[in-house]
Image: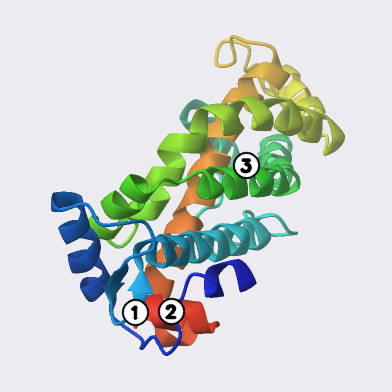
């Protein structure tokens, strides 16, 4: 918080995000000296830093939320389903009480996502720190999750690279790969799964895990923008009003 507070002029009053947008937008038309005030003593740099603070809080909260036991599995909004072809087989087998092997895969894919989520924290923080003033302007001008969209664009390729071995290891450790292999053998599913179980589940789980993670980054960002109770520091209250 001290880094952000250092950019606030003494006696600055709290302002709305709309006021900040107007001030930063004007500075893009008529550039102002670095450190000049946007409105009410809040500098352009401080406004941008406030946005970084909000995104950092949202990203860390999202990682913490999904990266725990039942973070995915216990949440119907982001629970990772089985791939469609396997899900259809699972539904059919459930009707005759034979879906146990696929039910186990389903659970353990979600457990793998929960175990892998914490690796996103550092990457999110690095992306937010590297945000430029122009990036901040675009985020302010955008919708309630425009910061999340920025993070998604900036980090998805790297997150996919980082998540893949972590997810694959977790799929092994949680027994999901073994469970899928058993399900394939027991239920004759080789025509549905064309790749090695580890690769097949890994590619699918990484995409779904990132979808769930960014869903909650967006929820947190939107809440900080609109809910005063979420603005837990002086700088957030100053920036977001």
Numbered disc 2: secondary structure: loop
Residue 208 shows up from this direction: yes
Rendering coords of residue 117 (x, y %)? 67, 46
Image vertical order of residue 170 relative to residue 146, above or below = above
Q: Nearer the viewer, residue 187 or 119?
A: 119
Q: Quadrant of residue 169?
A: top right
Rendering coords of residue 177 (x, y %)? 77, 26
Q: Which residue is mark 3?
A: 123
Q: Quadrant of residue 168?
A: top right
Q: Which residue is mark 1?
A: 41
Q: Please give the label number shown on residue 212.
A: none
Separation (CA) of disc 1 from disc 3: 32 Å
Q: Please give the label number shown on residue 9.
A: 2
Dot placed on the residue nearer the N-terminal end, 1 or 3? 1
Image vertical order of residue 98 relative to residue 61, above or below = above
For the point 79% across and 35% down, the residue is 170
Dot placed on the residue nearer the N-terminal end, 2 or 1? 2
Numbered disc 3: secondary structure: helix
Numbered disc 1: secondary structure: loop
Kindly indicate whether the residue at mark 3 contacts the one at mark 1 (C-beta within 8 angstroms): no
């Amino acid at each position: 918080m001290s880094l952000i507070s250092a950019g606030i002029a003494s006696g600055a009053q709290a302002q709305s995000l709309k006021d900040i947008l107007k001030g930063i937008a004007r500075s893009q038309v008529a550039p102002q000296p670095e450190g000049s005030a946007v409105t009410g003593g809040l500098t352009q740099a401080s406004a941008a830093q406030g946005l970084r603070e909000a995104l950092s809080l949202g990203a860390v909260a999202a990682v913490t939320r999904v990266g725990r036991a039942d973070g995915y599995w216990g949440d119907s909004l982001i629970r990772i389903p089985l791939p469609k072809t396997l899900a259809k087989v699972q539904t059919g087998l459930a009707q005759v009480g034979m879906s146990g092997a696929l039910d186990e895969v389903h659970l353990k894919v979600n457990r793998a996502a929960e175990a892998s989520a914490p690796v996103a924290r550092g990457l999110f923080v690095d992306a937010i720190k590297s945000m430029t003033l122009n990036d901040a302007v675009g985020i302010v001008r955008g919708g309630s999750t425009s910061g999340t969209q920025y993070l998604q664009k900036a980090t998805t390729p790297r997150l996919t690279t980082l998540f893949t071995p972590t997810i694959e290891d977790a799929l092994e450790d949680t027994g999901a790969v073994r469970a899928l292999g058993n399900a394939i053998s027991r239920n004759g599913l080789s025509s549905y799964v064309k790749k090695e179980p580890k690769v097949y589940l890994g590619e699918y789980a990484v995409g779904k895990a990132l979808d769930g993670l960014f869903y909650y980054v967006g929820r947190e960002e939107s809440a900080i923008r609109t809910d005063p109770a979420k603005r837990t520091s002086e700088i957030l209250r100053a920036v977001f009003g």
